[in-house]
Image (cartoon, rainbow, N blue to C red):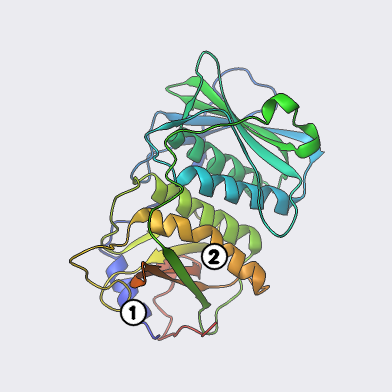
Amino acid sequence: MPFSWGKIIALIAVAFVYRSSAVPATPLGDVNDAVTYQVSNFSLGVDPRFDMRVIPLEDRPVRPMSILLTALEALSTVALRDYTLQSFPQQLRFRGPVSSEVLIYVVPVPPAVSVLNEITTQCIYYGVANLAEDNLFVEAKFQCLWDNVHVADVNIRKKTSVRARDINSRATGSTEALGEEIQTEYGYLDDAPNIDVKTVFITIMNAIKSLSLEGPTKVMTGLLHTDPGPQWDASIIYPDGPTHRPTRRQPPFLKYRYVVASMKPAQEYMVQHRRYAELIFKFVVDGVYIGDALLIKGKPDRLASRNESSVATA
């Protein structure tokens, strides 16, 4: 399936772009060994009242893939809920063919008994992204702040470190059962360059975080891309036009939540094929093809020199 990089780059010049990153800020409170990050309102849906502290437990190392796999699973689970609703204390674990030595659990700070899904989503993403950027794969606590108030903790712990009372969990407002049959077809782009494994995880998790904050029913329109920031050499493009997103006058439409639901399986596809590289996603809902996404190496504005490319059959 051929597509024109020239057309994509031309459209990007006038497209609304999602962009999100974490920048240093003045520490809020006296917390030993805490690194504080302020989340600026760079992307639609990020509330400027959100902030967080990352507290790494540097004497408790964890296998990098355990953190990345479990964080991706946790983020995917929370992101498919309505971000305006709240969840009770919950334990999030990786369920897959390989083992993970960690759990992620979310605990509201009393007197609160639940935490907004929007806060949990951002806290998981920005906390893990900053650990990965520092190449610091250890147990950690992420303190979630709202209007400078400490409202919840997201904890990464080895399974042997989690006490029995942390195991019980329940959630409210979940839309994990999407109600439609969503199928995503994946394939490597022709001559696709490989992408660093850690970069793939952070790029996919950034997309989940950014798109989930648009809400469970919003339809994707126009040309967009999600970008985890200059320190990560990859991004995801959501091209429009008849070649990549057919015009539809009746459902199913390409909703943000369909794209969110496709992200974790993309990583599983690359594991299955033992290669992390540029990838195309083809979204099919109830048997109807409704659009594409492209995981690419680099940033969209660096692709103008690329010639025609086509998708390799998987």
The answer to whether any part of residue 87 appears in the image is: yes
The answer to whether any part of residue 20 appears in the image is: no
Q: Nearer the viewer, mark 2 or mark 1?
A: 2
Residue furthest out toward the top: 111
State which quadrant residue 154 falls in. top right
Numbered marks: total: 2
What whole-number distance in Å separates the C-alpha atoms at marks 2 and 1? 25 Å
State which quadrant residue 126 falls in. top right
Q: Residue at x 49, y 51 (%)?
A: 206
170 up-or-down from 103: above or below: above
Q: Which residue is mark 2?
A: 266
Q: Quadrant of the N terminus?
A: bottom left
Q: Quadrant of the C terminus?
A: bottom right
Q: Residue at x 46, y 54 (%)?
A: 207
Q: Residue type at mark 2?
A: Ala
Relative depth, front residue between 222 and 26: 222
Q: Position of residue 274 (x, y in %)?
A: 68, 73
Relative depth, front residue between 281 and 308: 281
Mark 1 is surrounded, within 10 Å at the Cα level, by few (under 14), some (14 to 19) or many (20 or more) other residues, namely some
Q: Which residue is mark 1?
A: 6
Could you tell whether 275 is left or right of 152 in the image?
right
